[in-house]
Amino acid sequence: LLLRGAARLAERRRRGEALSSRWAGPIELVVPAAPGMRGEVDRIVLETLAARGTAGGGARCSVVGSGSRRAAFGAADVAIAACGTVNLELAAAGVPQVAVYSTSWLTGFVIRRLLRPVLRHASLPNILAGRTLLTELLFEDCTPCRIAEEADFLLARPSLARAEAAQIRRLVLPSLRAVGDGGEPQLASRAAARALLRHLPEAQTCTL
């Protein structure tokens, strides 16, 4: 089970406590961490997950460097990931996932008032598809119990989980491919440069 993309250590702790209290049987939790966060993540994860897992009988936890995340993606049966670009990374890797996001009540209030009337989803795969392809647990729905329930649902149904992940990959990834004016594939960096040039009058004479 992969825990990925938590910008706040509190979110990692909450997810870890949810999972370690839910599963007492054999399960391995993998947490990729950026170099600057490795020590703190090690401490929190080892305290809240590994200790509980050992006491619970068979659960293991590993914190790996962010450079090992591709290997972690390939080995994961299910991922719990904060809403962000990591949802697209997991979709590209074909990993079943649950998207989560929790914040302060004030930020949640602002998001609901300003964004919710226009944007109905929080994870990029759902936004790009314009419909729900993967489960999102947001704000008050992002609780330890709900996170564990949704992850457990996918873990208990591997065939269904992989089919859903394949559907997300099939429907979403083609929309991310950069193409030229004639529909030919091109580098994403070139497509971004062309888009910028259209908004820079002094650069209209440049060609790419």
Image (cartoon, helix red, strand yellow):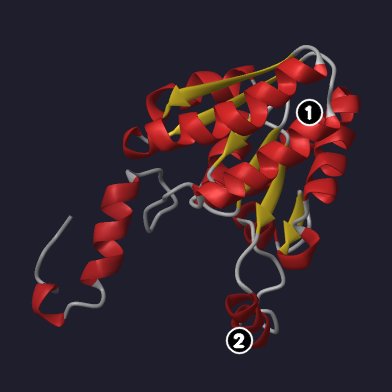
Vertical side of 70 occupied by 83: above or below: below
Horizontal side, residue 101 vs residue 42: left or right = right
Horizontal side, residue 121 vs residue 5: left or right = right
The residue shown at (84%, 33%) is 22
Horizontal side, residue 147 vs residue 203: left or right = right
The residue shown at (39%, 31%) is 39
Q: Which marked residue is nearer to the observer: mark 2 or mark 1? A: 2
In the rendered image, which residue does mark 2 sit on?
Answer: 114
Label 2 or label 1, whichever comes before in sequence order? 2
In the rendered image, which residue does mark 1 sit on?
Answer: 162
Q: Position of residue 168 (x, y in %)?
A: 71, 43
Q: Position of residue 71 (x, y in %)?
A: 51, 18
Q: Which quarter of the rendering shows the N terminus?
A: top right
Whether pointer 2 and pointer 1 mark residues with C-beta atoms closer than 8 Å, the reply is: no
- Mark 2: few/some/many CA within 10 Å (<14, 14-19, 20+): few
Q: Which of the two residues, 173 or 4, is positioned nearer the viewer here?
A: 4
Query: What's the amino acid at mark 2?
Result: Leu
Residue 104: tell me if it is visible: yes
